[in-house]
Every structure is written in structure tokens, then in C-alpha cells.
Image (cartoon, rainbow, N blue to C red):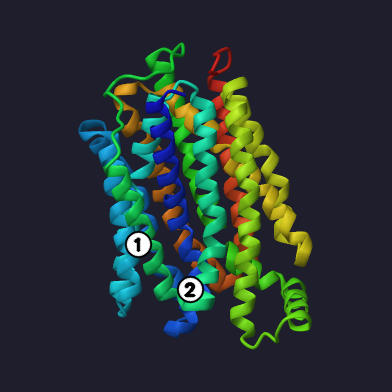
Amino acid sequence: MNPQERRILFFCSATHFLTHFYMLVFPALVMPMSRDLGLPIATVLNISFWMYLLYGLLALGWGWISDHLGHNWAMNTGVILSAGGFMMAGLVHSLPLITASFALVGIGCSAYHPSGLALVSQGIGKRGRAMGINGVWGNVGMASAPFVSGLLSYFIGWRLGVVILGAAGLLVGITSVLTPFSVERGTEVKKVEKLASGTAVRLFVIFCVGVLFAGLMFRSFSVILPTFLESRLGDVSLGFRNLLSRRFASVEDLPAFQTLVATLIATGVYVLGIFGQALGGRVADRYSLKWAYFIFFCSALPFIIAAAMLENALLIPAAGIFVLFTVGMQPIENSLVAFLTPARWRSVSYGIKFTITFGAGSFAVKIVGALQRSYGIGSVIYLVAGFLALTILCVGVFLLLSRGKAIRH
């Protein structure tokens, strides 16, 4: 890569890391916030509703801003806003203000995907590889968020923890503002043979329906994962506690320790997604995008069904391999958007995709809360499997509509 491409990839990857890190901080704080605020789990989950809703709904608006005012301007503004939201969340005390603070995090984080992915897709020649690297850093953010958040909460409390996380994001945003890089509107380095406009529009529509179910699937899974693990890892948590008690010191606060173990294991689950992103990036440059997309989703289905049935140590690899495939498909999915859409509307196209993904995903918070109250936490994992099956059905229709069309880099 030339220096311009390296700067684009570095700051897009750093902001991608922060975006996914920030959006997965909240699930790791559900139990500590529930204890601190004296609220039931379902009520605490609802605090995040506006954060996840605005994260999705505003992506299209950020896409328009990005296409007209500059991708890097939109990306930098977003990360600074989200950092400010976290700092505010740690400093306020009323429930409405805490909810508003996390909503500001969602507003800021919604800017990254339409602006950052437009920068990567238009400004870097090796698009699939760059999407894979960029995706890896997003997944590092996902993987580290539960453990870092759990660790900060355990040692210094969730309030001071989110203030520190906000300050770190503010530093990244200011550094990015001071570094020159940009992509001229309507241009892209990568050249591929485009489909006829009518065909591309039809395929993009069915693609977006699949993205709707995929968004519901992944948000349902991610918002409940640390709490689900804490409820199912009894023997594992007990084993960790006994080990520490024998070798170091007795663990006094058992609920807080169980949360810490669950967030540590959630981190391990998301680590497998890092390998999935690297694999997905290589696959995107070498093979048919549409068939790779279909195969990744199909490969994930048996593992989420297994996760719903298993407990203790066996649950961990099942959840991890599910994440490997459902996160690993993202470089392929984002390459499909770039293939199907014109460069001059690239940010808007990503905005449409992520408005659907994250906007629909925000309603998963409500669905998950209601399902958990009525049928227990295990029922949520079956819901995730159902959304995945509907996603696979939509991708199957995409394959039928695009038969005979080469969709590859």
C-alpha cells in the first residue's frame, strides 16, 4: 500500500476498533449496573435501546453527510461524539441522563460504517484484504470490550471505567483530525466489472432483506452473551474461584467474580471472530462473493443450535465457532455492497445497509428483554437461530436471482 492507503487503513481500523468496542461495553455492564442502580436486568437492558436504535437509524444520515462533506470528516466527528457520550454516562446519576448518554454513544458510533467503509472501499486497491484487516480490528474491539469493561468495573467501578474509555476515544478522534487523508468523491482505486443497474438494484434489495435478519440475529446474540454465559457457566466459574482461592486469595464478592469470568470468556468467544475476519478478507479477494456469503452463514447454524443446548465448558467452543462464521462473513458482506453500488453513493449505500442492520438490531433489545422475562434466557439463543435461518433463506434467494452472474473481485 502507498502512504495514503496506509493512513486510511490505520485510522479506519482504529475507529472501527472503537466503534465495536463501544457498542459492546454496555452488555458487559448489565450486571454491575443492575446491582449498582438496584434495577432488574430487563430494565437495565432497556437503557441501551436508544443507543442501539440511533446507532442504526442514523447511519443513512451519516452516509449522506459523508458523501457530501467528506468521509474522514464524518468519521472523526462520530468518534468524538461517542467518546463524549461515555464520559457523560460515568458522570451523571439519573436514569434518563444515563440513557441519554448511551444514546449519544450510539449517535457517534453510527457514523463509522458509512464513512469508514467508504474510505476503505474507495481508497484502497486490495479491497478484500483491506476489508479483512479493518474487520479484524473491529473484532479486536468486540473481543476486548467484555473483558476490559468487566475488569474496569471490578476494580474501579463501571462509572469511572466508562469515563476512562471515553477519554481514550477522544484522543483517537483528535489525532485523526490532525492527520491528512481523504478520497475524492465518486472515485475508487479498485476496478471491477459492474452488473447492469436494474440487476444490481434487485440484488441489493434482497440483500438488504437478508441484512435485516442478520442484524436481528447478531444484536440478539451480542446483547445477551455475557449474561447468558454467566447463567450457564456454573462449574467453570466455580473452578476459577477455587483455583484462585487455593493459589492467591479467597474471592469474597462471588456475583462480581462470576460476572468477571463471564466477560473473560465472552472475550475469548469474540477472539475467534478475529480469525474469521482474516479468513473472510482472503476469501473475498479469491472466490465468488455470493457463494462465500451463503456458505459462511450455513456453517454457523449448527453451532448456535448447539450453544442453546449446552452448558459449562462445552458451551464455549460452540459460541466461539458461531461467532467465527457470523463475524467472519463481514468482509464478504461489505465487499458485496461495494460491488453492487456506485462509488458516488458508496457512503449512502453503506448507510442503508447499516441503518437496516443496526436499526433492526436495536429492536432485538426489546425482543430479548421480553423473551427473557417470559421464557428465560435460554430461549433467546433459539431466537438467534431462527433469525439466522431466515438470513440463510434470503441469501438463497439472492443466489437464485444472480445465477449466471459473476460477483467477485
Cα separation, mark 2 vs mark 1, equals: 29 Å
Residue at (53, 21) in percent of width and height: 401
Amino acid, disc 1: Ala
Q: Which residue is mark 2?
A: 42
Q: Is residue 54 visible?
A: no
On the rendered structure, is 227 left or right of 303?
left
| Residue 330: x %, y % from top left | 53, 38
Q: Which residue is mark 1?
A: 167
Q: Nearer the viewer, mark 2 or mark 1?
A: 1
Pointer 2 or 1: first along the chain: 2
Question: Within 10 Å of the Cα at label 1, are there few (<14), some (14-19), or many (20+) other Cα atoms?
Answer: some
Q: Secondary structure at mark 2?
A: helix
| Residue 250: x %, y % from top left | 70, 87
Q: Nearer the viewer, residue 162 or 45?
A: 162
| Residue 383: x %, y % from top left | 59, 56
Question: Within 10 Å of the Cα at label 2, are there few (<14), some (14-19), or many (20+) other Cα atoms?
Answer: some
Residue at (20, 34) in percent of width and height: 69
Quarter where residue 388 is shown: top right
Q: Nearer the viewer, residue 214 or 112?
A: 112
Q: Kindly identify which numbered label has been placed on residue 178.
A: none
Residue at (67, 43) in percent of width and height: 300
Residue 292 vertical placement versus 225 (above, below) = above
On the rendered structure, is 389 left or right of 352?
right
Are discs 2 and 1 less than 8 Å apart at CB? no
Residue 113 vertical placement versus 206 (above, below) = below
Q: Secondary structure at mark 1?
A: helix
Amino acid, disc 2: Ala
Q: Nearer the viewer, residue 137 or 300?
A: 137
Residue at (54, 13) in percent of width and height: 405
Q: Is residue 34 visible?
A: yes
